[in-house]
Every structure is written in structure tokens, then in C-alpha cells.
């Protein structure tokens, strides 16, 4: 049944558009949330996945990694829908937003379920095109710039991945994961190595790692509020980071060069993202650089190549989508109520918006890795995996990166939320922006506190895949 | 026949590399949105040719043709979306110069 | 072989013309010419279906999209055009340098690719490959077309009368 998760959002979109249009416009948010809830239910009550079930006519397969990605995708999409509907007063724009977001969700479900490199490309393009449309949907000048930069860099990444697929086709005769894996891991030819390098570079562009991060701060900060939540929470993670994990683990294999590249890119991303975030004035732009830094942690963990490292990477991926979405929800609430994102002109917001302030504290403590929140456990697993793999220097650098994370988030918290109140007439944000923040903070706290219960049901089975 | 197709692949790959260079050059040097799109389109045509020639040398022309068809359709939709963005930019600032849209920095 | 070589040289030449020409409309027409030459190449390479798709979609649809976008947006003014041409001449020096470097790079690595010559792909021709073996891609394409429709509605339709 979960295999139909690509088709369910499509059915919802068709339902929304081919019917009683006035009624459907009112129900758009409800239908969207229903799809997300159905997806969460299907993932959580899926039973034991030992056999890769397949549909007779489509080539989808699900394993535990796909389930984790679909769960986080559904949670973030539901959040983005609620936030988008709360911040867009125009009914028609909100309706289009709901439709395109559901199509993006369908694309992401497809990305995590295919077992074929070329189908991966097609579904990546679905996600990318719906992201371009979403970023440009409010028609602001900055949004057009962000969307165009994202479009150009995503198209360049696509061209690189496609040319790599073409060269690998010459060596493997087919584009499914199994055939390409046999071709790549058994061959030493210069062409195969070049194709691998070009493919991984394309994936890094999509994930927004240094030095290919040029589009990311612009796209995240200039997008409308709901779209920022969607982008930061799940789109970049699915199209860039999940595909890297899947392709490196299953197809290219962990040889020494690839591991070295991943480690270096990861550690550079952590530090460059963290230092750049220290100097930002725009709240969303700082959060965007913080995303680059956290994705650096995931790639660093992937670079160890051990089971513990990959488990830490996947767990941190899930945690990051939860707490980063929550930070963006808080930024949306602050922007909506005070009208600005400039951190220097805001102050003492927590006095009038206590819920936003305190949930933001929970989220940023989780980002910096403070116990007992969920971020602490995932960073602990990453550092332990690095230490066990003998990469002591990298482990120490990762801990240092956590300290810098703590520094810039404390700066943001102090500037924006604590202190004396500067702006008059600011009230707490509406229910649509408070409720997702509270729910996501509860999830972060819950995963952190109940982690010993989770470790046997979620972490160990995921890592035993590889 | 294999030797013939390898030498043919060589000839093609030189020209495909030239097309890639042209496409990237256009993308880097231009100051106009529409010309950037033309650069992207030239890159796409280079990749289509690469896919077909890869299929030709490995006797997978059916698979390569279906891949090329998918690539063509996908890129048509991406170009349509990009044209929409360009149109929106023009309506907003009245010019198609990329240098006028360098607002987000840092 | 000489036919293929002629077509390839014409392909690169028209791509260069499309990039370097001054007027946007000529650029779009140059792109259409590149599509037509690519169609001929694909036809010679024994890929007729892809050639037909390339002709109808790229040389048709995309050229129409480009020409309509160019017509609906105002061209650059005369002074801007002069300024841009002067700047471009300064920046043209990239191109020969890159091409020469590329040829030197290729010259060092004359390693022949070792592709394998596989048996036929499940004994089917293109139409059956698409319909029977690559249904996932077809589903992805249908979703993408739906997304494109929404994109056109969102980006083109709404009024720009709010703020400017």
C-alpha cells in the first residue's frame, strides 16, 4: 500500500481540480493535510518490511531508509501547508500553493522509492520544477532572483548527472541500481572514475555543499514562508542528501578516495556554513547557512563508511528536517507579526511572543547538540563513529563546529528574542503558526528523551541495511 | 564493428565536449536571462547527443532513445517554467539584465 | 563518416553563432538550427524516434516559447547594447583558451573507452521499451507535465497589479 504513495498526492491534486471549484478551494488545506496524515500512518503502521514488495507494473521498492524519508517528508509538508495557508491571505494563491506542494511531495516520494538511476533523474526534475514554481509564486523581486539562481544551478547539476548516466550506460547496459553497481565496482577505467566524480559533484550541487552552495542562501531567504519551510526541511535533503547516501552506499561503494572527498567536503561545509552564519543580519539567511553546516555533519558521517556512521547520518537527517523546519516556522511567525527579518532591528520579541521564543530555544539547543534533545543523540553517534573509525581530528573538529553553532544561535536568540522590547504593537502569532512549532518541538523533545527506546527499533535496523 | 564504433565515439566525444564548453561559456559570460536559458538548452542538446552515442556504442539504442525522449520532454517543461520566471522578472523590473538583480548578497 | 563529420562541424558552428550573435532573436533562431542539425545527426545514428521528438519539441515548441518571450519583453536599449558589446569583446578571450586547454587535456589521455557490446535489450524496440519496461519514467513524466501546467498557471496568469 505504501507503494501507492506516489499516486495518492496525484489523486488528491486531480480531486482538487476536477470538481466543485468553490468547495474545493475551501477544502484545499484539509485535503493536503489528509494526504500527509495518510502518509504518516502508512509509514508508521507498515509492519515489518523484510521483503521488498513491488507493484506489478511500476518499479518501486521500499526499504527502511525510504520509510524514514517519507515520514519526515510528510511531517514537513504538513507543516509547510499550515504555515503557507496562515501567511498567504489570497485564497487563489493558497490553492495553487497547496496543489504544487502536493505535486512536490509526490515527486519526493518517487525519489525515495525508485531503484533506477534514470527514473531517479525524472523524479528529481519533478521536485526541482515544483520548487522553482513555489519559490517564484509570490512574485517578489528577490524571489525571482533566488528562483532563477536555483534553476540555473539545478539545471547544471542535472546535466552533469545525465552525462554521467550516459557514460555509465556504456559500461553497464542498463540503468537500474544493480546493473550500474556491478559495472562500477568491477571496473577501473578512467571513464568510470570520471563519471563517478561528475555524478557526485552534481549531487553536491543539489545538496548545497561548499563550494556549490551559491544558490542556497538566496533561495531559502527569498522564498515565501511556507515554501522556505518546505525547501529547508525536506526538498534539499531528499534531492541532495538522500540521493548521495543512496548512491554512494549502494552503487559507488566506499572506496578510499570517495570517503576522503566526503570527509573533506563535510568538514569544510561545517565550518564555512557556521562562520558565514555568524555574520548574517537576515534571520532566514542565517538559518540557510546553518542548514549548510548541518548537512556538512551528515556528509561527514557518511564519509566514515561504517554502519554506525551511516546510521548517525540518517538519524541526523531526520532530526535536522524536524528542527530546521521548526526554526523556519518561528522565523515566519516573527516576520509575519513584526514585518521584518532584520535581526538588528528586532529585540525582545520573546516578551510578546512567548511560544515562538521558547520553541525556538528548544530547536536551537537541539541543533547545537545539547542533551537531552534529539540533536545531541545524533551528533553523539556521529562523533563516536568518527572516533571509532580512527578519524580523531575530524571528531574534534565536529565538536568544535557544535560550539560555533551554539555561538551563532545564542547570538540570534539574544538579538531577536530576549532583551528589551523595541517594537510596539506586536502580538503573538496566530494559531496556524504556533501549533506546528509546538508540535515539532514536542517531537524534538520526545525523540531526545525517549531515545533509548528508539535505538533498537529504528537506528539499528537502518544501519544493518548497508 | 567495435573498432569502428569506438573511433566514431571518439569523433563524437570531441564535438560533444566542444558543445559543453560552448554551453558553459554562454552561461558564464552572458548578462541576459534569455541568453542564459539558451546556454542551458545547448548543454541539454549536448547531453542528448551523448546519451544516443552511448547507446549506439553499446547496442542499447532502444533504451537510449527512450532516455533521450524523456530528457527532451523534461527539458521542454523546465524551459517553459524558466520562461515564466523571465516573464515575471521583466514585468517586475522592466529589464532583462542580470546585473540589475544582484540584490541578495553575503 | 564524412556526412557525420560535416554535420558535427555544422552543429558546433551554429551553436557558436547562437551564442555570439548580438540580437536575441537571432540567438533563438540559432538554437532552432542547432536542433535541426541534431535531428539530422540522430537520424543518421539510427535513432528515428528520438529525432522526431527532438524536431517537434525542441525545434518547434521551445523555439516558439523563446520567440514569444523575446517578443513580449522589451529589448535592451541602444546604449546598453553598445555597452554590452564592448564588455563582451573583453570577455571573449575565455573561449579560445578553454578550447586549447581542452584539446591538450584530451591529447594526454588517449585511452580508448572499453564499452561492452551487449545483446539486445530484452528483445524489444523503442515503443515497447517505453511502454513495458520504463513505466516508472512515464509516471514521472505525467507528474511533471501536471506540474508544468500548474507552473504556467501560477507564473503567467495572475495579475501583476499588486505592486511594482
Image: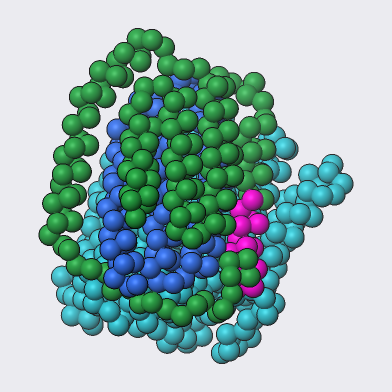
For the residue pair A134 and A364, the one nearer the viewer reads as A134
Q: Residue furthest right?
A: A20
Residue A388 against residue A415 in the figure, above or below? below
Residue B21 percent location from the top left of the image: 28, 44
Where does the C terminus of chain A fall, quadrant-wise?
bottom left
Whether C142 is among the magenta residues is yes
Residue A420 visible? The answer is no
- Judge left or right: residue A51 versus residue A263: right
Residue in the image at 33% along x and 51% along y: C2
Position of residue A368 measured from the top left corner of the image (x, y, whole percent):
34, 61
- What residue appears at the point 58 percent right and 66 percent down from the top-left corner? C126
What residue span does the magenta drawing correspond to?
C129-145
Q: Which chain is cyan?
A: A
Main secondary-structure element of the magenta-colored stretch: helix
Write the residue at 49% across / 54% down. Answer: C43
Identify the hue of chain C: green
Q: Residue at x 64, y 38 (%)?
A: C152
Q: Is residue A313 left or right of residue C123?
A: left
Q: Position of residue A444 (x, y in %)?
A: 49, 66
The tint chain B carries is blue
Residue A230 relative to residue A363: left or right = right
Amino acid at each position: 500500500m505504501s507503494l501507492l504513495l506516489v499516486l495518492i498526492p496525484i489523486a488528491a491534486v486531480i480531486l482538487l481540480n476536477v470538481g466543485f471549484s468553490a468547495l474545493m478551494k475551501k477544502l484545499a488545506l484539509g485535503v493536503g493535510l489528509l494526504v500527509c496524515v495518510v502518509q504518516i500512518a502508512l509509514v508508521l503502521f507498515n509492519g515489518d518490511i523484510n521483503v521488498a514488495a513491488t507493484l506489478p507494473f511500476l518499479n518501486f521498492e521500499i526499504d527502511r531508509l525510504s520509510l524514514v524519508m517519507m515520514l519526515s517528508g510528510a511531517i514537513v509538508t504538513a507543516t509547510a501547508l499550515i504555515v503557507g495557508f496562515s501567511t498567504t491571505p489570497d485564497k487563489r494563491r493558497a490553492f495553487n500553493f497547496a496543489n504544487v506542494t502536493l505535486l512536490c511531495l509526490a515527486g519526493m516520494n518517487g525519489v525515495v522509492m525508485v531503484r533506477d538511476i534514470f527514473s531517479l533523474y525524472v523524479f528529481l526534475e519533478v521536485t526541482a520544477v515544483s520548487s522553482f514554481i513555489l519559490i517564484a509564486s509570490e512574485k517578489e523581486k528577490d524571489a525571482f532572483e533566488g528562483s532563477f539562481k536555483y534553476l540555473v544551478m539545478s539545471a547544471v547539476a542535472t546535466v552533469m548527472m545525465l552525462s554521467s548516466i550516459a557514460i555509465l550506460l556504456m559500461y553497464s547496459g542498463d540503468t537500474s541500481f544493480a546493473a550500474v553497481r556491478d559495472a562500477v565496482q568491477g571496473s577501473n577505467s578512467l571513464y568510470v572514475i570520471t563519471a563517478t566524480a561528475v555524478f557526485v559533484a552534481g549531487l553536491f550541487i543539489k545538496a548545497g555543499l561548499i563550494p556549490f552552495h551559491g544558490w542556497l542562501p538566496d533561495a531559502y531567504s527569498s522564498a515565501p514562508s511556507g515554501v522556505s519551510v518546505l525547501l529547508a526541511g525536506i526538498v534539499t535533503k531528499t534531492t541532495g542528501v538522500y540521493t548521495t547516501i543512496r548512491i554512494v552506499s549502494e552503487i559507488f561503494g566506499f572506496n578510499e578516495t570517495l570517503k576522503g572527498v566526503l570527509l573533506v567536503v563535510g568538514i569544510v561545509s561545517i565550518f564555512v556554513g557556521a562562520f558565514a552564519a555568524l555574520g548574517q543580519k537576515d534571520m532566514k539567511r542565517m538559518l540557510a547557512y546553518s542548514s549548510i553546516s548541518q548537512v556538512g555533519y551528515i556528509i561527514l558521517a557518511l564519509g566514515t563508511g561504517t554502519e554506525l556512521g551511516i546510521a548517525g547520518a540518517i538519524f541526523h537527517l531526520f532530526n535536522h528536517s524536524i528542527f530546521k523546519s521548526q526554526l523556519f516556522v518561528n522565523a515566519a511567525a516573527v516576520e509575519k507579526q513584526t514585518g521584518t527579518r532584520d535581526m538588528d532591528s528586532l529585540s525582545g520579541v520573546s516578551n510578546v511572543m512567548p511560544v515562538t521564543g521558547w520553541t525556538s530555544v528548544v530547536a536551537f539547543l537541539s541543533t547545537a547538540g545539547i542533551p537531552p534533545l534529539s540533536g545531541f543523540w545524533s551528533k553523539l553517534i556521529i562523533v563516536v563513529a568518527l572516533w571509532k573509525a580512527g578519524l580523531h581530528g575530524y571528531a574534534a573538529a565536529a565538536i568544535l563546529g557544535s560550539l560555533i553553532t551554539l555561538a551563532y544561535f545564542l547570538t540570534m536568540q539574544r538579538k531577536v528574542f530576549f532583551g528589551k522590547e523595541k517594537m510596539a504593537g506586536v502580538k503573538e502569532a496566530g494559531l496556524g503558526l504556533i501549533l506546528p512549532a509546538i508540535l515539532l518541538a514536542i517531537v524534538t523533545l520526545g525523540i531526545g528523551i525517549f531515545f533509548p527506546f528508539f535505538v533498537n527499533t529504528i537506528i539499528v535496523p537502518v544501519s544493518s541495511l548497508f | 564493428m567495435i573498432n569502428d564504433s569506438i573511433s566514431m565515439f571518439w569523433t563524437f566525444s570531441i564535438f560533444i565536449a566542444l558543445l559543453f564548453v560552448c554551453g558553459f561559456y554562454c552561461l558564464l559570460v552572458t548578462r541576459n536571462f534569455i541568453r542564459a536559458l539558451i546556454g542551458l538548452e545547448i548543454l541539454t542538446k549536448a547531453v542528448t547527443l551523448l546519451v544516443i552515442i552511448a547507446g549506439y556504442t553499446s547496442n542499447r539504442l532502444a533504451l537510449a532513445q527512450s532516455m533521450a525522449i524523456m530528457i527532451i520532454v523534461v527539458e521542454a517543461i523546465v524551459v517553459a517554467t524558466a520562461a515564466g520566471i523571465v516573464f515575471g522578472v521583466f514585468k517586475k523590473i522592466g529589464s532583462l539584465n542580470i546585473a540589475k538583480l544582484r540584490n541578495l548578497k553575503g | 563518416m564524412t556526412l557525420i563529420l560535416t554535420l558535427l562541424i555544422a552543429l558546433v558552428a551554429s551553436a557558436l553563432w547562437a551564442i555570439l550573435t548580438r540580437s536575441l532573436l537571432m540567438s533563438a533562431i540559432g538554437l532552432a538550427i542547432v536542433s535541426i542539425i541534431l535531428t539530422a545527426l540522430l537520424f543518421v545514428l539510427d535513432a528515428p524516434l528520438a529525432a522526431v521528438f527532438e524536431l517537434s519539441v525542441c525545434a518547434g515548441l521551445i523555439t516558439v516559447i523563446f520567440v514569444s518571450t523575446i517578443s513580449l519583453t522589451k529589448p535592451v536599449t541602444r546604449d546598453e547594447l553598445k555597452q554590452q558589446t564592448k564588455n563582451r569583446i573583453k570577455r571573449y578571450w575565455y573561449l579560445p583558451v578553454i578550447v586549447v586547454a581542452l584539446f591538450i587535456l584530451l591529447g594526454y589521455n588517449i585511452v580508448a573507452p572499453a564499452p561492452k557490446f551487449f545483446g539486445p535489450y530484452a528483445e524489444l524496440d523503442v515503443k515497447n521499451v517505453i511502454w513495458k519496461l520504463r513505466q516508472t519514467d512515464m509516471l514521472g513524466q505525467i507528474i511533471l507535465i501536471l506540474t508544468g501546467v500548474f507552473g504556467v498557471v501560477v507564473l503567467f496568469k495572475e495579475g501583476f497589479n499588486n505592486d511594482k
